[in-house]
Amino acid sequence: MKRFFRRLVSRLFRRRRPFKPFDRSALPKPPAPSFDEMLAEGVLVAESAGRMALKNRLIVFALRGEERFEPARAEAIARDVLYELVQEADEAAERAATERESASQREGRSAHQHDYHRVDTVNLRHRERVYAGVAKRLWELREDPDYLERFTEHARDAAWEDIAAAVEARLDREWPDIEVDAEYEAERDERTRELLVDLERDLREAEAERVRRAEADDAFRDFVG
């Protein structure tokens, strides 16, 4: 028994080897994503931005209440949204090409993220190809009826979820306990119109903010380095 305790004490209080500080540079570098992987990710980013834009436009049409929802009209709006994304991707490819041409004339090391030099021309060419590939793929999807139908359905479902959530939140906040009487029933249509006007104003402000952010940067900035 004494021998056991001596071993236990020796193990617990023995001098431990110091841990080696973590050296991130010693880690193996992850493999660079392939062109196909970057293209697929770029298309996903663009589709996400497109669904959000289409959703917001469908919400505005719904709150105006001018016309009933028509799949053909919604798909036409979807084609417009995708066309805008094609233009954005084409413009991004052109910017990358311009930056590549300029970088090829500069030697030395970069001073910041967007200070490109000759050493960056390969990456800039890679980025240019990805943007061009995204534009080409979005154009193909824009001409695919089955894709447009699915794209529109997803945006429509998201739009109705947002509208329902906004209406429920507004009702819970302003009319938590309502006594339904003849006066309430008589004024229902007017209250509904006021609610729709307020919701449309809020959504216009949200759309204006989205446009402002889109103008500050393109939808594809996060998927390529």
Image (cartoon, helix red, strand yellow):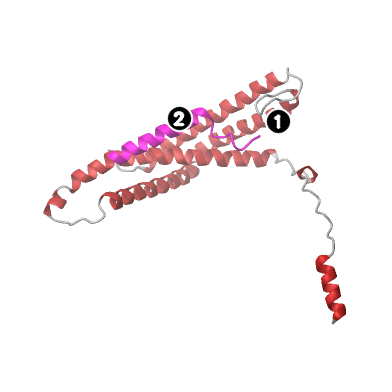
Disc 1 on helix, strand or loop? helix
- Relative side of 116 to 81, left or right: right
Q: Residue 83, labelled with which disc?
A: none
Disc 2 on helix, strand or loop? helix
Seen from this angle, which residue lies furthest left?
182
Please rate how many residues cluster around mark 1, counting C-alpha atoms within 10 Å: few if below 14, some from 14 to 19, many from 20: some
Q: Amino acid at mark 2?
A: Arg
> Could you say which quadrant of the image residue 43 lies in?
top right
Q: Amino acid at mark 1?
A: Asn
Indicate whether residue 201 is drawn in magenta.
yes
Q: CA distance from mark 2 to mark 1?
A: 29 Å
Seen from this angle, which residue lies furthest bottom?
1
The mark that comes first in sequence, 2 or 1, is: 1
Question: Residue 164 location in percent, x, y?
Answer: 34, 50
- Relative side of 17 to 90, left or right: right
- Relative side of 189 to 196, left or right: left
Q: Could you tell me which residue is drawn at 49 percent across and 31 percent down?
A: 214
- Callout in the foreground (2, 1): 2
Question: Residue 171 location in percent, x, y?
Answer: 28, 51
Where does the magenta region start and end?
Answer: 198-225
Residue matched to label 1: 123
Question: Residue 224 location in percent, x, y?
Answer: 64, 35
Q: Residue 212, labelled with which disc?
A: 2
Q: Could you tell me which residue is drawn at 46 percent across and 34 percent down?
A: 81
Q: The C terminus lies in which quarter of the figure?
A: top right
Indicate whether residue 56 is drawn in magenta.
no
Q: Nearer the viewer, residue 44 or 145?
A: 44
Q: How many badges with numbers are in the image? A: 2
